[in-house]
Image (spheres, rainbow, N blue to C red):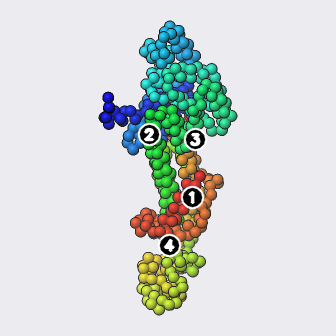
Amino acid sequence: MIVNNSRQTQTDALLHIAVVGHTNTGKTSLIRTMLRSTEFGVIEDAAGTTRHVEQATISADNTPVLNLYDTPGLEDSRALFAHIKKLQAKSATLRPPQILEQFVTQVTVNDPLEQEAKVIRQVLRSDILLYIIDVREPFLEKYRLELEVLTRAGKPIIPVFNFIASHERELEKWREYLSSYQMHATLEFDTVAFAFEAEKRLYQKMQSLLESHYNHLQKLIDYRAKLWNQLCLSGARRIAELIAQVACYRESKTVNNHLIAHTLLEDRLQEFVRKAERQCLHDLLTIFNFSEKDVAIQNIPVSNGQWQLDIFAPGILKAYGLDVGSAAAKGAAAGAGIDLMVGGMSLGAASALGALAGASWSTFRRYGDEIKATVKGTKWQCADETTVQILYLRQKHLLKKLMHRGHAAQDMLHVDKADTEKLPDQWQKMISTLRQNPSWHEPSPARNGNAQFQELETKLVAALLDA
Ligand SMILES: Nc1nc2c(ncn2[C@@H]2O[C@H](COP(=O)(O)OP(=O)(O)OP(=O)(O)O)[C@@H](O)[C@H]2O)c(=O)[nH]1
Ligand SMILES: [Mg+2]
């Protein structure tokens, strides 16, 4: 019979995965990390935290692909194994999965093996098992017995090594033990120290064990990879935005401002930088689906800097679109333009900036205020070099941490110093360009379409994502 029914196809595509293992090995943690959600289930450093089977679905483009089943931890594997052996001795003609079926139907409420029966019931209903191992534990008899029982279900099993960070020796031992039980398709997946590659390998292992689900799993792998790249890119873009926002910030220090006003300006700058960083942190947490509970942020030290546009500094004229070479030729025609733009200032002061004479009207329209301020000798209050640097380094560090934080992580991430990070190449140049373009402090069609801004953003993003 040919079944050509989309409901049927969808059901066939859905893969049922039981997450099993000894109690407190990180089963619920693994599911949280795979779902990228801190909301699923309850995680605790205690045996018997999960008491019932709980289900979660992973989709690709709104099509459900995986059903994950979190199960209670196996506790009394010795009693479980003995019980199964007894059943088998009584019914020698039954195949191992049928014995397990018999066990499940016989166990009643309040039976000492009730927990175990819930697990085995789910195992029998699933297509594949993820057997979670805490590698810090030696390969004890209880684990061997658990595996003996689980293999009787006749389902493919992927042993998943958890708690692997700084436990290489123990991991190697576990690998050896499992090989001697014909289990070679093992996987390292630390649920706390997350790596997207590990997630991808998990799906690839499933592909190799479940040929009929190969294409659906491939769709999921491609979808998750695309999603992951987008997350990282959005995170890096958000930080580049913060850098632009802060590096472009400036307030003019007018000659009339007295001392108190200066302090006020400094406070405003400090508040501005801190608020901008907090907003960026909030957005990054949202992008990676974490919450404020995951991160503690130390207030950034902000020092104020002074900045004055030096129109004659190397490269500045060019950056402003001024053609120095043709200055002399166009001098006479542009002279009147400068006078109009600087509004009321003596033409003498303006023409003292001899090199400006080559500028076009459009340049003056764009940079008129800058030039006027230059002629007047205006100084600007801005975040100093060190502040912008620290901001970048902290955020880069945070981004890296978020990219490697499993959603099972319980410890708090601290955003403080980031001595291990490096500034990107041409950092000075990038900051100087931003300062010369204060209107870039927020997104606008003009800014986003500007080739110079685009190049700068691309460089920042690449540097932020370079591992
Ligand atoms: N450091 C570290 N801790 C982990 C890791 N995985 C889990 N944990 C911790 O281990 C403890 C148990 O995690 P759970 O996910 O609740 O374990 P479980 O297997 O679901 O436990 P039960 O439901 O009781 O069987 C928690 O304190 C987790 O924070 C890991 O990879 N690294
Ligand atoms: Mg649990």
Q: How many marks?
A: 4
- The answer to which of 397 and 264 lies nearer the viewer is 397
Element at label 3: loop
Whether residue 420 is visible to the viewer of this picture, yes or no, is yes
Whether residue 249 is visible to the viewer of this picture, yes or no, is no
Q: Is mark 3 within 8 Å of ligand 1?
A: yes
Marks 3/2 in contact by CB < 8 Å: the verdict is: no
Along the polypeptide, which appears first: circle 1 or circle 3?
Answer: 3
Local packing at callout 3 (Cα closer than 10 Å; few below 14, some 14-19, many 20+) is: many
* Cα–Cα gap, marks 4 and 2: 61 Å
Element at label 4: strand
Tag in front: 4 or 3: 3
Q: Position of residue 73 (x, y in %)?
A: 52, 25
Q: Is mark 2 within 8 Å of ligand 1?
A: no
Local packing at callout 1 (Cα closer than 10 Å; few below 14, some 14-19, many 20+) is: some
Q: Which residue is mark 1?
A: 463
Q: Which residue is mark 4?
A: 252
Give me the residue at 45% from left, 68% from top. Answer: 450
The three-letter amino acid code for the residue at tag 4 is Ser
Element at label 1: helix
Give me the residue at 46% from left, 48% from top. Answer: 227
The three-letter amino acid code for the residue at tag 2 is Asn
Tag in front: 1 or 4: 1
The three-letter amino acid code for the residue at tag 1 is Ala
* Cα–Cα gap, marks 4 and 3: 46 Å
Q: Is mark 1 within 8 Å of ligand 1?
A: no
Q: Position of residue 95 (x, y in %)?
A: 48, 15
> Looking at the image, which residue sits at the far bottom?
332
Q: Which residue is mark 2?
A: 215
| Quarter of the image that includes the N terminus | top left
- The answer to which of 445 and 47 lies nearer the viewer is 445
